[in-house]
């Protein structure tokens, strides 16, 4: 028999075997693979089409497609047919991208590239403001993309209905938020197609943008339905959605065209007064840009050129002469002209010409009023329009109400945030390092003036004078025309502007295109006198004529200096838009807000469901184990 182990050795071996057994028990057995079939994950609506975009370069190509198409639709290129498909690549990206975060980032990048390229004219007067405004406007692209993606993927709503509502609402917000910048609206593309823009007298330019966005949405729905018919197992819902979109956009387009034909056929426009518009070509400079250029025109030479044009235009006997905003620096108000000999010469020259030729003269000027008892500022400055009458009386005056932020005034001048005003004023180029407070004061109201035409002694005409970018703001021209609401208060508008701040480029024709809608919305003729252009006459139907392009035979050193004399049309219609304003745009903006609320509520509800489902899933798994 083998010798028995000592008692101590046996106990140690027993303990080792017990420990080894405990380790084996603690190790969980390998899990067996269950033989059940995997459940398919619920796919988004557009993923069923087989075009769920997950590669970043797909999104870049689609965003670039919208950038290129949208950049070609505005003046001076104005290839307006592309406006009906310019949003389609971007809409495809919104609906078919696999990740929502990528959609928003690429939409923001699209906005940055678009505005930085197409607003490059703004870099001439202010590089800092140019960058800040481009970044601010770019935010609207992801803000528009979010509710569109939610409506399509979650609710499967037709794009022809969702896109125009959201896009038009965003245009309204851009037109009023932060003093407003209603530039690059979809409606501004077909400004020469008179049939399409007549609906503006009902709902404003927003109605034309609504139509164009609806056609873009219908085209995108047709693309999705075509892909579904080739790749998806059940393309029925997508095809029905596309049919509704095409029907909706088609009916809308037919209504706009028929309405346009009817309005253009109406005989409501008659010949108004004969007006002479005068255009100079003098580039405005920011003082901090450097020393004056050698060929910069002195103020006295500018005065001589304009008075020479007035003498030449007098041969055609106009009843009113229209000069641009700040044709040269002058003040014609009594408080300023009595202290400066040059200002007094300007005043006497205008007054003598008005009396001698029996005509009215409207010119832009600066108004400076000393306020020695004011504790805030020693003088008050205004951007004004002076109206000289043939009777030789003291000229009338309209002070610009809607001033351009940072260009004409620095915010926070009064109140508790005045310290911000001093800091901002110090970094502005017009303040000479904070040594000068260049901020002007706004006018007190939208005044209209009267004139009597030379050949129509029994007819008085009333007119308003939107200055510079005031003709871009829809509500300002409406306020001039509507007055106190008791009927049409202005027969025509006179726009004076100085676009010489932006060099000679694409800004000038874009400004003209926007002004066309002010004429159609309120059924008033518009005469424009703009430094560096584009000066022209706009009929109440939106037709542009007698554009000042410069006369090679009669030039004063620049090819954009010239004048035109023509009669301006007067329309008897009192439009629905003049009566009720931007009711349509505000309705779209409210629906856009409702779409955002629905998006937020859905996200909160979905997150709560996931959080509640997680503990139940863990409990079920524990019971199975």
Image (cartoon, rainbow, N blue to C red):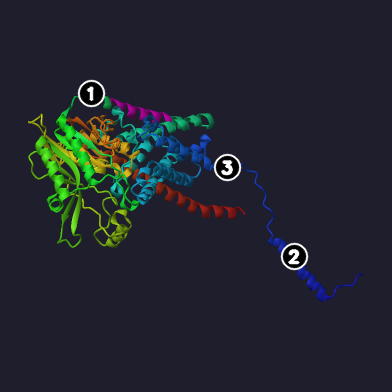
Determine whether 419 is above or below 200 in the image.
below
Callout 1–callout 2 Cβ contact below 8 Å? no
Question: Residue 334, percent across and down?
Answer: 12, 50
Question: Residue 512, percent across and down?
Answer: 29, 36
Q: Which mark is residue 372?
A: none
Check disc 3 and report its element: helix, strand or loop: loop
Q: Is residue 79 visible?
A: yes
Q: Which mark is residue 39?
A: 3
Q: Which residue is under mark 1?
A: 265
Q: Which secondary structure type mostly characterizes the magenta part of the structure?
A: helix
What residue span does the magenta drawing correspond to? 241-258
Q: Is residue 54 visible?
A: no
- In front here: 144 or 350? 350
Q: Which residue is under mark 2?
A: 20
* Residue furthest out toward the right: 1
Which of pointers 3 and 1 indicates the residue nearer the eye?
1
């Amino acid at each position: 028999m083998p010798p028995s182990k000592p008692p101590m050795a046996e106990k140690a071996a027993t303990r080792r075997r017990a420990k080894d057994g405990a380790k084996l028990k603690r190790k969980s057995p390998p899990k067996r693979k269950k033989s059940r079939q995997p459940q398919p994950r619920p796919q988004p609506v557009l993923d069923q089409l087989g075009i769920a975009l997950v590669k970043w370069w797909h999104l870049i190509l689609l965003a670039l497609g919208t950038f290129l198409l949208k950049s070609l639709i505005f003046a001076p290129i104005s290839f307006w047919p592309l406006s009906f498909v310019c949003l389609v690549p971007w809409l495809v990206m919104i609906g078919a991208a696999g990740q929502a975060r990528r959609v928003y980032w690429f939409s923001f990048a699209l906005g940055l590239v678009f505005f930085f390229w197409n607003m490059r004219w703004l870099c001439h007067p202010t590089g800092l403001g140019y960058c800040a405004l481009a970044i601010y406007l770019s935010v609207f692209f992801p803000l528009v993309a979010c509710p569109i993606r939610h409506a399509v993927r979650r609710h499967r709503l037709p794009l022809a209905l969702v896109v125009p509502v959201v896009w038009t609402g965003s245009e309204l917000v851009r037109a009023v938020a932060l003093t407003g910048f209603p530039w690059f609206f979809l409606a501004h593309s077909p400004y020469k197609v008179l049939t399409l823009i007549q609906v503006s007298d009902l709902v404003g330019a927003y109605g034309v943008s609504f139509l164009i966005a609806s056609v873009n949405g219908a085209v995108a729905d047709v693309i999705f339905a075509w892909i579904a018919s080739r790749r998806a197992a059940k393309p029925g819902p997508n095809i029905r959605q596309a049919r509704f979109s095409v029907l909706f956009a088609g009916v809308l387009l037919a209504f706009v065209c028929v309405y346009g034909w009817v309005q253009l056929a109406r005989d409501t426009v008659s010949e108004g007064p004969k007006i002479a518009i005068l255009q100079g070509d003098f580039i405005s400079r920011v003082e901090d840009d450097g020393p004056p250029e050698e060929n910069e025109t002195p103020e006295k030479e500018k005065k001589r050129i304009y008075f020479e044009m007035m003498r030449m235009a007098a041969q055609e006997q106009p009843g009113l002469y229209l000069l641009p905003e700040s044709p040269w620096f002058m003040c014609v108000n009594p408080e300023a002209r009595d202290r400066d000999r040059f200002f007094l010469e300007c005043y006497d020259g205008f007054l003598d010409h008005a009396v001698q030729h029996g005509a009215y003269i409207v010119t832009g000027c600066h108004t400076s009023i000393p306020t020695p008892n004011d504790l805030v500022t020693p003088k008050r400055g205004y951007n004004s329009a002076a109206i000289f009458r043939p009777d030789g009386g003291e000229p009338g005056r309209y002070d610009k109400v809607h001033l351009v932020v940072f260009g004409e005034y620095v915010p926070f001048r009064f109140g508790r945030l005045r310290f911000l005003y001093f800091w901002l004023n110090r970094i502005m180029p017009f303040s000479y390092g904070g040594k000068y407070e260049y901020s002007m004061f706004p006018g007190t109201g939208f005044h209209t003036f009267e004139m009597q035409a030379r050949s129509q002694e029994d007819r008085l005409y009333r007119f308003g004078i939107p200055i510079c970018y005031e003709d871009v703001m829809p509500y300002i021209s409406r306020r001039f025309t509507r007055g106190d609401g008791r009927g049409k208060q202005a027969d025509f508008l006179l726009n004076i502007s100085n676009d010489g701040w932006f060099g000679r480029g694409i800004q000038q024709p874009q400004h003209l295109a926007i002004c066309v809608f002010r004429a159609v919305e309120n059924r008033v003729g518009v005469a424009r006198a703009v430094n560096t252009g584009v000066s022209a006459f706009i009929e109440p139907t939106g037709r542009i004529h007698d554009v000042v392009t410069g006369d090679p035979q009669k030039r004063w050193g620049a090819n954009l200096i010239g004048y035109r004399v023509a009669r301006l049309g007067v329309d008897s219609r009192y439009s629905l838009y003049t009566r009720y304003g931007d009711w349509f745009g505000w309705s779209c903006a409210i629906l856009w807000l409702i779409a955002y609320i629905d998006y937020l509520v859905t996200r909160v509800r979905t997150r709560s469901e996931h959080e509640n489902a997680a503990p139940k899933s863990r409990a079920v798994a524990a019971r199975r184990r």
